[in-house]
Image (tube, grey):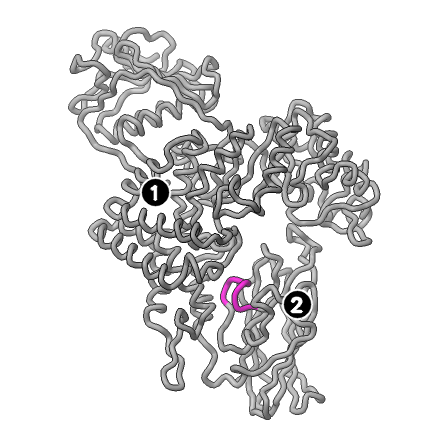
Amino acid sequence: MNRSGKLIILSLLLMASFTGKAGLTIVDNHRTLYAIIIPQAPQPQEVRAAGLLQRYLLEISACKLQVVRTDALTGSGAIVIRSSDLVANPDGFIIQAIGNQLHITGGTHKGCIYGVVDILERYLGCRMYSPHFQITLKSDMVYLPELNYRDEPVNSLRIVNGAFCLDEDYQDWQRLDQVREVFPDGYYVHTFHRLIPWESYFTEHPDYFAWMNGKRIIDQLCLSHPDVLKIVLNKLGSEMILQPDKEIWSVSQNDNFSYCQCDACRKIISEEGSPAGPIIRFINEVAKKFPDKTISTLAYQYSRKAPLRTKPAENVQVMLCTIELNRSKPIREDPGSESFLNDMEAWGKICNHIYLWDYTVNFNHHVNPFPNLQVLQSNIQLFTENNIHEHFQQSNTGNGHEFSELKAYLISRLLWNPDVNADSILTEFMNGYFGEAGSFINQYIHHMSNEMEKSGERLDIYEHPTAHQNSVLSLRNVNEYNRMFDQAEQAVANSPTLLLHVQTARLSLQYAIMEIGKNDMFGPRGWYILQGEDFILRKEMAATLEEFNHVCREAGVESLNESGLTPEIYYEATKRFIDVQVKGNLAFGKPVSANPPPEPKYSTGDMTILTNGVFGASDFRAHWLGWEAKNFTLILDLEEIQVVDTLQISTLWEGKSWIFHPAVVACYTSGDGETWIPAGVKTVEGDQRNEPVTRTFLFSPGVTQARYIRFEVTGLLQNPDWHPSAGGGCWVFVDEVVVR
């Protein structure tokens, strides 16, 4: 210990507090006789806890407490921070005032860090609502009452997925974990391809891979093949040497719907009553080889149903996923969740280590209204009541995502204590994060939640805003929501920070208005009005787009969906979309035929989509027609001979959804529909790894006369080799045909 540390300890032994009243006066008039004491050889969590406390006390009181390392201190005037295995829960803590000392004793993981955060929140009024906004109350005195209490989390693993937890302070303040703290790099989920990459094995050993529809495919592994087990064991063994500190290793299915149905696998599936049967038998063999590790696998989509005969080994973790469920009702109250409830119960009877993967956002439209706050507490309570204490809440937190800060704040507290008063948390957040605007935002949330409940509609994690355009997002409701946001903005007009919070929250409503308008382009909620013979862009819709783009920039919004659509790309795609091709477009309103026809589940297969004057934007569910793993031909009939000069057609790219630009588009013209004249061929070069969202194939054959235009579209047919689901059938989506 250095000389200054000895002097501090001596002074601490001589004095207690400044005021003499019950409790501890840590700082008085910006002065202190306290120090923060940690062990001579501290653990990282003890150093972290002391640093947090020192930093925040300095921000509160402008007084910097010394951090002293010693094992020998007795007496008064100390804040003693220790980790101890006497605190049974690794994240639990005990807070005690002993004489004029404050003892913060935590479990061996982050207990002492969480103890410090609890004091800062509970007694000193500090809050961290997002990585970018916190509240620290200034005072020349720091006083703590007599304390003697303890707390610990109900759940042992608490992950809220997203960008916010990349901030260490935010993560600790919300008492959350991160995937990378628990799982090895590259071995979280969907690891079959990593363990046995098809690129290295399929050509010589197709029998290592799944048998489906009379052939071997690269989508999944054949888990009954003995060599597959040997390769996985060898691969895992070598990987574990590289990351020896990691305990949980994922051996889990790739992210698609395929699974092996060879004779051996099919026999196991029949015996077990579920495709999970071959998986669990395989995983148990892996777990047997590595008894000191935990082997994790998925109960996901086709593998969600538990096997009838085989129990997971003691060192096997089962990740149970809720991806199919409705988000508008608590799981236990929704009749559509019956099969999940049965599966959860069945897994609970055979497995003591379940990791719950839940989904709380709209993946295709992160910024869209998604009124599910009312179900979060009930669902987390349901999971913990069923002895599930490891949670991955896929909220995909990020700036601008619909109430991202609020949902993460609420979920983190529910994961710590599922029975906490959720209404009190919501009220406190509203007042702190939105200030005087909080009551209006609260009205908005409750009104939308009530409308969701009244509608009885399903809330899906992939739905388009138009799913609720006649109910939750009806014109009447949208007008009411806008009124509430107008009031909220007025309430904090003099606070740039709070105003930006409100404007950022309003992005979701603006997004819904714009997307619904795209589906009703020339209607009462659309982008255009008809004046005489011209379509005129509505000023209020154009203003909404500009404001949306401006606030996204101001708030640092980086993405609008799971595929990484940026606000900049969305803005440009929307500008393109609303640039209607009516005047001078010879194709406007003309009939188009297709062979084969498009899939009816997108835009109902309505061929008029191709000549309605409206370009498709960034979402394949609106104003696009799709063909899966097929080449196709489109023929446009101009209904009479016309002089044409340029011809064009557009396509979409969204690799995550298995949508790629075509490999080749060829164009032909004809006067009679019998004799065709080539107008050009366009080819997409490369592997389409980094393509623009939209492509326009423009053909300029020179001035010619034609009645019919034919496009022959040759797709990739299969996902490219670099794709996570390489070899699976992929899509081509096309939209507006323009002829001038």
Amino acid at the residue labelled 1: His
Relative image position of residue 386 (x, y in whole percent)? 55, 30
- Position of residue 460 relative to residue 154, above or below, is below
* Mark 1 Cα shell of 10 Å, populated few (<14), some (14-19), many (≥20): few
Res. 241 in view: no
Q: Earlier in the sequence, mark 2 or mark 1?
A: 1
Residue found at x 55% / y 69%: 695
Relative image position of residue 241 (x, y in whole percent)? 65, 28
Quadrant showing the N terminus: top left
Real-space CA distance between mark 2 and mark 1, rounded to the nearest whole angstrom: 44 Å
The answer to which image quadrant residue 190 occupies is top right
Residue found at x 45% / y 53%: 559
Amino acid at the residue labelled 2: Ala
Relative image position of residue 250 (x, y in whole percent)? 64, 35
* Mark 2 Cα shell of 10 Å, populated few (<14), some (14-19), many (≥20): some
Q: Quick check: is 492 in the magenta stretch?
A: no
Magenta stretch bounds: 617-624
- Position of residue 399 relative to residue 389, above or below, is below
Is the Cβ of the residue at disc 2 closer than 8 Å to that at disc 1? no
The answer to which image quadrant residue 147 occupies is top left
Q: Main secondary structure of the magenta part?
A: loop
Q: What residue would you read off at disc 1?
A: 132
Res. 209 in view: yes
What's the mark number on residue 663? 2
- Position of residue 683 relative to residue 287, above or below, is below
Q: Secondary structure at mark 2?
A: loop
Residue lying at the far right of the rendered structure: 263
Q: Nearer the viewer, residue 461 or 63?
A: 461
Residue found at x 79% / y 51%: 216
What's the mark number on residue 572? none
Q: Nearer the viewer, residue 661 or 316?
A: 316
